């Protein structure tokens, strides 16, 4: 299983980015997919997830600003990030879970700064 994350970059506060996570196999083969982030000196935290059935969940800190979607024809999961804040700056990682095994993408840097 390979996960390729992309879409990070430098954006001003209040701006938007869309992250993409392309999987090497059908994303419907996974139990869950999610986006995590890790800022310098902090633990990795889950920001958004989607179950096989399509149920979404978000961290309280991002509710209303981030939206997770998926395109099963492209085997890709997206994270639309709006109203970005400096505290959203981190390396964002794509995750896929198959039973008890976690797969990770390589991470994409998001920097929110003026």
Image (cartoon, grey):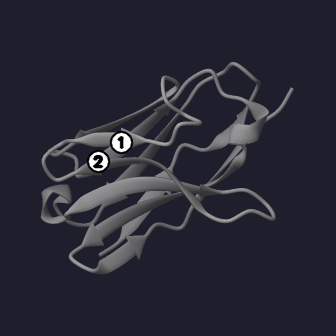
Q: Quadrant for the N terminus, please.
A: bottom left
Viewer-side residue, 61 vs 27: 61
Q: Are marks 2 and 1 in contact (CB under 8 Å)?
A: yes
Q: Is residue 96 above or below residue 5?
A: below
The residue tagged 1 is: 57
Residue 99 in picture, x, y percent from top left: 21, 76
The 10 Å Cα crowd at callout 2, few under 14, some 14 to 19, many 20 or more, is: many
Which residue does the image show at 36% across and 42% down from the upper left? 57
Is 24 left, or right, of 72 in this rendering? right
Residue 20 in picture, x, y percent from top left: 42, 45
Separation of disc 2 and disc 1 at Cα? 7 Å
Mark 2 or mark 1, which has the lower sequence index?
Answer: 2
Q: Which mark is residue 34?
A: none
The label nearer to you, 2 versus 1, is 1
Residue 84 in picture, x, y percent from top left: 66, 27
Which residue does the image show at 76% across and 25% down from the upper left? 12
Which residue does the image show at 46% across and 52% down from the upper left? 35
Which residue does the image show at 57% across and 61% down from the upper left? 107
Element carrying mark 2? strand
Element carrying mark 1? strand
Viewer-side residue, 50 vs 10: 50
Residue 11, quarter of the rendered image: top right
Residue 100 in picture, x, y percent from top left: 27, 80
Is 13 left, or right, of 32 in this rendering? right
Q: Which mark is residue 50?
A: 2
């Amino acid at each position: 299983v390979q996960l390729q994350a992309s879409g990070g970059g430098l954006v001003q506060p209040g701006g938007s980015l869309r992250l993409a996570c392309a999987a090497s196999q059908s994303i419907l083969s996974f139990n869950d997919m999610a986006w995590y982030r890790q800022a310098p000196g902090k633990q990795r935290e889950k920001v958004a997830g989607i179950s096989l059935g399509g149920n979404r969940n978000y961290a309280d800190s991002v509710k209303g600003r981030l939206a997770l979607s998926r395109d099963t024809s492209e085997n890709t999961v997206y994270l639309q990030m709006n109203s970005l804040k400096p505290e959203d700056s981190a390396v964002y990682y794509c995750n896929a879970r198959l039973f008890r095994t976690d797969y990770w993408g390589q991470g994409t840097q998001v920097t929110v700064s003026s």
